[in-house]
Image (cartoon, rainbow, N blue to C red):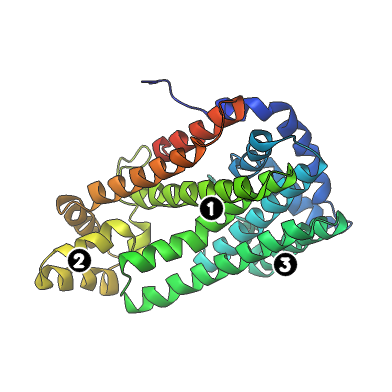
Amino acid sequence: MNLRKITIKDIKSPVKKEMEQFESFFKDSMKSKIRLLDIINRYIIKRKGKEIRPILVFLSAKLTGEINDSTYTAAALTQLLHTATLIHDDIVDEAYERRGFFSINALWKTKAAVLVGDFLLSKGLLIALDNNEFEQLKVVSNAVREMSEGELLQLEKSRKLNITEEVYFDIIYKKTASLMASCTQLGAISAKANYEDQQKLKKFGEYLGIAFQMKDDLFDYEKQGSIGKPTGNDIKEKKLTLPLIYVLREVSEKERRWALKIVRKHNKNSEKVNELIAFVKEKGGIEYTRDKMLEYKQKALDVLNAFPSSEAKEALVNIVDYTISRNK
């Protein structure tokens, strides 16, 4: 059993050179003659995240063939789309921080943030068109549709507070897993892998994305940062995620009404939210969600088992382990 902590550096190792080249390729794809836009884009680039999605594109290409110009286009396309959706998410959620830094809407207000998100989305679509990558464009356009539908479905269900486990998995597939599935599928497409391998890697990305989102949902109920307290942000936003969905299904009608009353009427009351978090833990919601997350981890690994051993395969296995063990 490998007890060494997996890092992004470890995962990136087989495609380290390609990721370094991707940095300048991605910067070029965001350039604009509009000074304000260029300033905001530089701010985005300096505060980039772990770049999991382009890493997935490159590793999937390396697993099934050779990394080439088409792979760089796919990586830029998915990263531009992901960045655009994060900006729009911050606007929708009225969030003023991301990864410990001010969000675009916090610094440049909502109007500018909406337009920057639109610009990045259009740049992503154009980079595919300019390189005649019509199949890539089709895959990503489907992901954009899925992501929009997922957000709207969650919004609809949050108003009624009637999310079932089946609907929850539909939402997280659309919101998160669809884009990760696009990354792994596009990597294989760019390397000219056969259709069967493309579909296998699409499934891998789907399972990985679902596990990734469940880990995010668990953060809401687990100790965070130096304060050592759960955030409870999903409850505050009236979002029902799997830990609470499971508990609502298992408890008595009286307990169910009590829990839903907190979500409906006391979701801004930190004391009440903490009571609900403790209740979810006591009733097994955390354990149930962790078990489900591990199921999807195994599904992802089972897909990878169909591929021969390689550095790229090992790195993709490491991404799966990293996804469920990360602390942020």
Query: Exactly how many numbered labels are in the figure?
Result: 3
Residue 328 at least partly seen = no
The reply to whether discs 3 and 1 touch (Cβ–Cβ < 8 Å) is: no
Give the quadrant of residue 325. Answer: top left
The image's mark for residue 269 is: none
Residue at mark 1: 97
In the rendering, at what x and y percent does residue 323 appear?
A: 45, 40
Q: What residue type is labelled 1?
A: Glu
Q: Which of marks 1 and 2 is in front?
A: 2
- Which is nearer the N-term, disc 3 or disc 1? 1
Q: Report the residue at 47% width, 60% height from top.
A: 173
> Circle 2: is it few (<14), some (14-19), or many (20+) Cα within 10 Å?
few
- What residue does disc 3 label? 115
Task: Please state the horizontal and vertical placement of residue 12, each as a whole percent of the image.
Answer: 62, 30
Query: Which quadrant would the C terminus be assigned to in this image?
Result: top left
- Label 1 and label 2: CA atoms lie apart by 34 Å
Q: Residue under circle 2?
A: 249
Tell me the distance, in whole angstroms, between the alpha carbons under discs 3 and 1: 18 Å
Q: Is residue 36 above or below residue 256?
A: above
User: Of tags 3 and 1, which is closer to the observer?
Assistant: 3
Q: Which amino acid does label 3 sit on?
A: Leu
**Mark positioned earlier in the residue sequence (3 or 2):** 3
Image quadrant assignment for residue 58: top right
Along the line of sight, the residue nearer the viewer: 131 or 240: 131
Quadrant for the N terminus in the image: top left
Closest to the observer: 301 or 87? 301
Three-letter amino acid code of the residue under disc 2:
Arg
- Whether pointer 1 and pointer 2 mark residues with C-beta atoms closer than 8 Å, the reply is no
Residue 8 pos. (x, y %) = 55, 31
